Amino acid sequence: MAPSESLSGETTYAAIETALGGDLPEGAARLALVHSPPPVRAPLAALLALDARLARIAGQTSEVMLGQMRLAWWRDVLGEEPGARPRGDAVLDAIGHQWGGREAALVEMVDAWEVLVASESMERDDILAFARGRAAPFAALAEADAQAEQARAAGLRWALAEAAPRLSDEAERERFVALGLEHCANRARLPPALKGLAVLDALAVRALKRGGRDPMEGRGAALVALRAAVLGA
């Protein structure tokens, strides 16, 4: 694999597309990046690209042990010093440029996807562990402790809403939606730096209230995203 272009702190959206290519998710993730201020855009892009990579591992794994081995590779490599990591993987290179010193939050995301891979049936505790771990990197993007809790709550809603429509088991999907709706009360307005997360959160709440349908389904999704980008909620 050819070495990827690096992402600087002020990276434009076009440069992010070039650097991450097919690793960058479509739909809501793209809207979140468009509406994110430049200093947050690159780390958010790396976060979303890693999440998409881990989701593919979980979705394409037919044997639990194989999936756990592939996730363990990510866990191990994120625990290494950036200079010791292999080069040439677009997502890993972006993480090296953007997440130095914050990799522990990304490891929580890896652990979250392992919960999904290892569980025969996701019950409430499993779902909550998955959502909390997947939300951890969003909290790491926040600049203050209070903002971190708000960001984690928003990330948790997004984690549940984004995963729900991809679940084949209807009862399991209903449990994801129900838990997400429990966490929709008392939503706090996110700071301007986290406009991208505000977009994801607003789309997540809309999707959960629609029974766990795709967050981008329907013509109202774009309007919801724009309103969240302007108002932060």
Image (tube, helix red, strand yellow):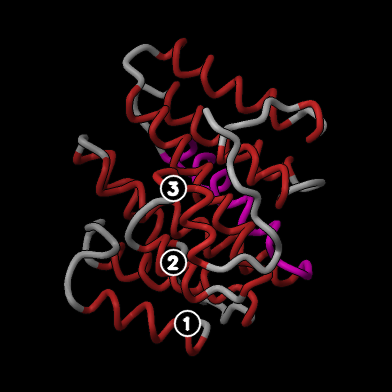
The residue to which callout 1 is attached is: 229
**Image quadrant where residue 119 sits:** top left
Give the x, y percent position of residue 108: 64, 39
- In magenta, the rendered stretch is 124-145
Q: Which of marks 3 and 1 is nearer the N terminus?
A: 3
Name the element at disc 1: helix
Q: What residue type is labelled 2?
A: Leu
The residue positioned 60% from the left and 47% from the top of the image is 5
Q: Nearer the viewer, residue 230 or 64?
A: 230
Q: Earlier in the sequence, mark 2 or mark 1?
A: 2
Name the element at disc 2: helix
The residue to which callout 3 is attached is: 21
Question: Is residue 212 magenta-colored?
Answer: no
Q: Is the magenta stretch mostly helix, strand or loop?
A: helix
Q: Residues within 10 Å of mark 1 (few under 14, many from 20)?
A: many
From the viewer's perspective, is the residue at label 3 or at label 1 nearer?
3
Q: How far apart are marks 2 and 3 (CA)?
A: 21 Å
Q: Is 106 positioned to the left or the right of 114 in the image?
A: right
The residue to which callout 2 is attached is: 200
The residue positioned 54% from the left and 76% from the top of the image is 195
Q: Is 65 positioned to the left or the right of 161 in the image?
A: right
Q: Are marks 2 and 1 in contact (CB under 8 Å)?
A: no
**Image quadrant where residue 74 sits:** top right
Question: Is residue 134 magenta-colored?
Answer: yes
